[in-house]
Amino acid sequence: GENVEQHPSTLSVQEGDSAVIKCTYSDSASNYFPWYKQELGKRPQLIIDIRSNVGEKKDQRIAVTLNKTAKHFSLHITETQPEDSAVYFCAAILTGGGNKLTFGTGTQLKVEL
Amino acid sequence: GAVVSQHPSRVICKSGTSVKIECRSLDFQATTMFWYRQFPKQSLMLMATSNEGSKATYEQGVEKDKFLINHASLTLSTLTVTSAHPEDSSFYICSAREKGIYGYTFGSGTRLTVV
């Protein structure tokens, strides 16, 4: 089945700096890659997603890049703010298996003042 | 936008009892419902997938007789944790998908504590 690896597990940045989180996936047939932000005790919140037919997508301070050949995708957050502090999960659709989302292991992002 | 209502948000039960968690899609038809479990500081682990009117498909290592899933309608799915034990204490969360739509709508989660 699909396997999604995520790095780093923790990331600490200064306010205003950029943060980058990287994920790799194993199933070359995967075609949908969402990123979620989860605050403690809350549901995952979709922040951006990308489909396999594009290489990059941007929404204000957040961007995602996808390299299908290398089977990796990254989340980029610019001009980080304290409210960006949370756990971020990447995910990939496991195609042909009921479209199950397989999640990465998560990255605890801390934005320090 | 799409909303999934999940109840209860928190539940404490005694060891050996059963607990039912309910997820309702409020403004769309949840043709597929996914049930996840999340232990502290860990990722979301898929437990099972259910399609409306069909038996649920369980992930390897998940006991189907212990975690009963019902998806009898397009707007309601339930997860029953039977004979709960302290090790079942976790954050349970559902995620609904509408046929033909890429997006996944998550419930608000249920914090289960078994004492």
Image (cartoon, rainbow, N blue to C red):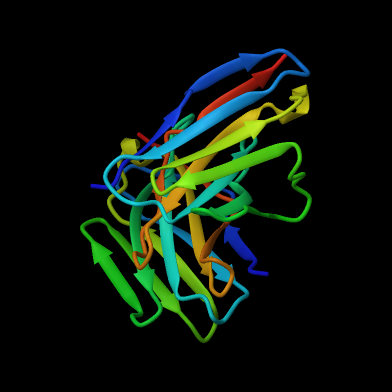
State the residue at coordinates (43%, 43%): A44
In the rendered structure, the answer to whether residue B100 lies left or right of residue A28 reads: left
In the rendered picture of this protein, how many numbered marks are placed on residues?
A: 0
Quadrant of residue B54 within the rendered picture: bottom right
Q: Nearer the viewer, residue B105 or B18?
A: B18
Quadrant of residue B37 within the rendered picture: top right
Above or below, A36 against A33 in this view is above
Does residue B35 appear in the picture of this structure?
yes
Above or below, B10 against B6 in this view is above
Which image quadrant: the C terminus of chain B?
Answer: top right
In the rendered structure, the answer to whether residue B45 lies left or right of residue A83 reads: right
| Residue B1 rendering spot, x and y as whole percentages | 23, 47
State the residue at coordinates (57%, 42%): B70
Above or below, B101 against B68 in this view is below
Does residue A108 appear in the picture of this structure?
no
In the rendered structure, the answer to whether residue A49 lies left or right of residue B39 reads: left
Q: Nearer the viewer, residue B6 or B45?
A: B6
Above or below, A54 against B17 in this view is below
| Residue A34 rendering spot, x and y as whole percentages | 41, 61
Q: Nearer the viewer, residue B78 or A16?
A: B78
| Residue B109 rendering spot, x and y as whole percentages | 48, 33
Instruction: Report the residue that reaches farthest toward the bottom.
Output: A69
In the rendered structure, the answer to whether residue B55 lies left or right of residue B32 reads: right
| Residue A108 rendering spot, x and y as whole percentages | 52, 43
